Image (cartoon, grey):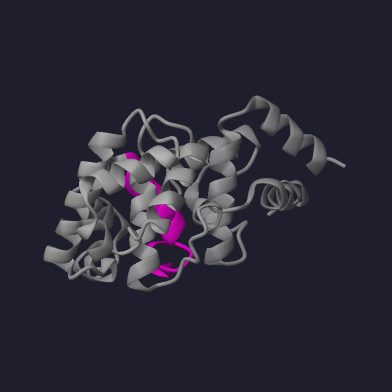
Amino acid sequence: MGKDEGAVRDVLLERYGRTFCGEAGIELADRPKPLFKLLVLATLLSARISADVAVAAAKELFAAGCDTPKGMRDASWQDRVDALGRGHYRRYDERTATMLGKGAELLLDRWKGDLRRLRDEAGGDDRRIAELLTEFPGIGPTGADIFLREVQAVWPQVAPHLDERVLDGAGRLGLPRRPEQLAELARSEEELARLSAALVRVTRSRKAVDEVMSAAAR
């Protein structure tokens, strides 16, 4: 790792390195409840809607008791719609409320409400985990990548999971585009998840790229 790469990493982590779980108030751990909350968040982030709205909607769902598979399943469809509406997730609220209920049922029926069982069924392989995740309504390849980017902080067996969006951000900042080389910049799985989130954020804004490069050069 070069000095310039280390400087870029440090600026990224300082300014943009909050995970999406962190924004949604999810204290991620290798336990059923926070893993389910991440699944909900990944579902919401998968739609063509701003990340801020998705995070706000997740918080409203959790506050309404939809923070476990059973809580999500047992909530009425209207309760889920109302919670999404309070988070301003209105464009997709009715369809998403249905998908979240069906996803909770699937998780309970097939994996007893515990995503660690899904991971173990996949043998810890991130590609197989992604395939299984796409069986949840509303989770496609993008949603699976979102889940894996965040969960690698507590599932070291899937790290490094660095998808094309992360690698695109790295390329814009002059960082390695090879996953193995980019992963070497992180000093832990938790930091790798933060770095991934930061690189996703900078893909949205040329201004952010210029800001990071300018600060790293000082």
Rendered residue at 43%/50% (across/down): 60
Asked whether residue 151 is drawn in magenta, I would say yes
Q: Tell which of 60 and 145 is nearer to you.
A: 60
**Residue 158 appears left or right of 200:** left
Where residue 152 appears, as percent x and y from the top left, is 44, 61
- Residue 175 appears anywhere in the view: yes
Residue 158 vertical placement versus 172 (above, below): below
- Dominant secondary structure of the magenta stretch? helix
Q: Quadrant of the C terminus?
A: top right
Q: Residue at x 59, y 61 (%)?
A: 191
Instruction: Judge left or right: residue 208 versus residue 77.
Output: right
Magenta-tinted stretch: 142-161
Judging depth in this view, the residue of 214 and 44 nearest the camera is 44
Q: Position of residue 210 (x, y in %)?
A: 73, 30
From the viewer's perspective, is 97 left or right of 108? right
What residue do we see at 25% from left, 52% from top? Answer: 133
Number of marks drawn: 0
> Looking at the image, which is closer to me, 154 or 159?
154
> Where is residue 69 shown, x and y percent of the image?
25, 62
In the picture as drawn, the residue positioned furthest to the right comes out as: 218
Q: Quadrant of the N terminus?
A: bottom right
Q: Quadrant of residue 109?
A: bottom left
The residue lying furthest to the left in this view is 109
Tell me residue 181's x, y (percent): 55, 52
* Residue 136 appearing in the image: no
What's the residue at 55%, 52% (across, down)? Answer: 23
Of 141 and 105, which appears nearest the observer? 105
- As for residue 191 lying within the magenta part, the answer is no
